[in-house]
Amino acid sequence: MNLTANLNATAILAVVVAAACVADQPPRPEDLRGTSYAQPMQKPDFTLRTTDGDSFDFRTETDGVVTLLFFGYTSCPDICPIHMGNIAAVLRTLPPDVSRRVKVVMVTTDPERDTPERFGAWLKNFDPSFVGLIGPLAEVNEIQIQLNLPPANRYGDDDRSYTVGHSARVIAFTADNRAHVSYPFGTRQNDWAHDLPLLVKPNWEAN
């Protein structure tokens, strides 16, 4: 092999190595399309009931996987079904090695109307793997405040048709049990498709 060929081979090898180093770099919040937190937020420790009536220790049950946590209710006319529908649609398109490392947990902000049967059936319409949690609203609001989310509030006197004001954000906890980003209402399917494969990567870079 002549000198020119050696130089070309060395140059190609350097490019490949450099590309591999970039690919192996830990993911960063600024690489994502969600809203970055100034400091990562620790995953909260709470226990509520699932729609099947089982006790669900949030921190333990979601340890080591990407967890998308959302607070909403089944009678919500827009934010809740759009968020759940978009996430479910994207999860169906992702490779199994990504989708099986994502857990979606929704906590109802309307425990009076969201019975286990109603809430469970509503979630299954999107994805049977989605976890629905139910607890007293006062306790749910304490969890939301801990996460720097506004507490849910009921509006209207009619016991059947009142609305519930609640946060529109989905908080994404990575496998390190911290949230680096959250996703507001208006997050599109192509944003989720871009971010979920990055969120499941290990060795998150602290910001």
Image (spheres, rainbow, N blue to C red):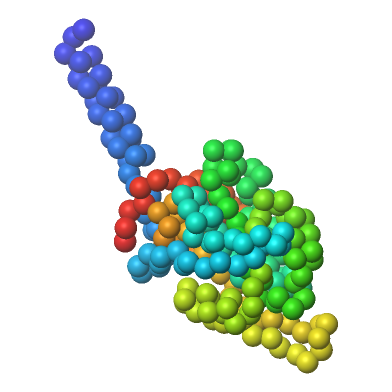
Look at the picture and state if 83 lies above or below 4: below
Instruction: Give the residue furthest to the bottom.
Output: 157
Look at the picture and state if 101 lies above or below 29: above
Look at the picture and state if 199 lies above or below 122: above
Q: What residue sits 67% from the left and 51% below the top?
A: 129
How far from the left and from the top, in percent, is residue 148?
Answer: 47, 77
Look at the picture and state if 80 lies above or below 123: below
Q: Nearer the viewer, residue 173 or 37?
A: 173
Image quadrant holding the C terminus, namely bottom left
User: Relative to 125, is 129 on the left or the right?
Assistant: left
How far from the left and from the top, in percent, is residue 206?
Answer: 32, 58
Image quadrant holding the N terminus, namely top left
User: Relative to 109, is 14 on the left or the right?
Assistant: left
User: Relative to 125, is 30 on the left or the right?
Assistant: left
Q: What residue sits 73% from the left and 82% below the top?
A: 163
Q: Can residue 183 be seen in this view?
A: no
Q: What residue sits 66% from the left and 44% below the top?
A: 92
